[in-house]
Image: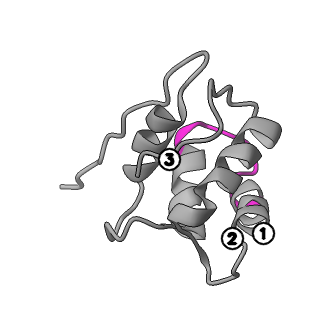
Amino acid sequence: MAFTRYHRALPQGETTVGEFRAWLSQFDANGDGTISREELERALRSLNLWFARWKAREAMREADANRNGVVDRDEMVRLYAFAQKHLHIKMSELEDNSY
């Protein structure tokens, strides 16, 4: 018997950075507080986006400033900006300092 993990959907309409971060944290498989390309790809697939693998690769290229293979806390704002610009996710606030 296979178990399917259900994820909360990203809120419709305008979302806050906190809601986006909470949604994205569901895909942090190892719980380290960072998002890898594979975790980001799973998150994008949950949105039924076309070319999720390609978009995850592009998001990592843009957001992972130190090129360590994950988006960490310091780079999350860059990921939010990518989501707004390229995934058309509307966020009410881009700066979020509540870590």
Pick whichever, 90 or 9, lies toward us: 90
Q: In this view, does 73 lie above or below 70?
A: above
| Total numbered badges shown on the rendered structure | 3
Relative image position of residue 97 (x, y in whole percent): 50, 47
Q: Residue 61 carries which label?
A: 1
Q: Distance between the residues labelled 1 and 2?
A: 6 Å
Which residue is located at x 52 percent, y 55 percent? 42
Relative image position of residue 79 (x, y in whole percent): 66, 53
Relative image position of residue 58 (x, y in whole percent): 79, 61
- The kind of secondary structure element at disc 3 is loop
Pick whichever, 81 or 2, lies toward us: 81
Q: Name the residue under label 2.
A: 64
Q: Which amino acid does label 1 sit on?
A: Arg
Q: Give the range drawn in magenta.
A: 46-54
Q: Earlier in the sequence, mark 3 or mark 2?
A: 2
* Few, some or many residues within 10 Å of mark 2 (<14, 14–19, 20+): many
- The kind of secondary structure element at disc 1 is helix
Q: Which mark is residue 85?
A: none
Q: How far apart are marks 3 and 2 (CA)?
A: 18 Å
Q: Are marks 1 and 2 in contact (CB under 8 Å)?
A: yes
Which residue is located at x 68 percent, y 30 percent? 89
Query: Viewer-nearest of labels 1 and 2?
Result: 2
Query: Viewer-nearest of labels 3 and 2?
Result: 3
Q: Which mark is residue 97?
A: 3
- The kind of secondary structure element at disc 2 is loop
Q: Which amino acid does label 2 sit on?
A: Asp
Left or right: 7 as drawn, with respect to 42: left
Q: In this view, does 39 lie above or below 81?
A: below
Relative image position of residue 29 (x, y in whole percent): 36, 65
* Few, some or many residues within 10 Å of mark 1 (<14, 14–19, 20+): some
Q: How far apart are marks 3 and 1 (CA)?
A: 23 Å
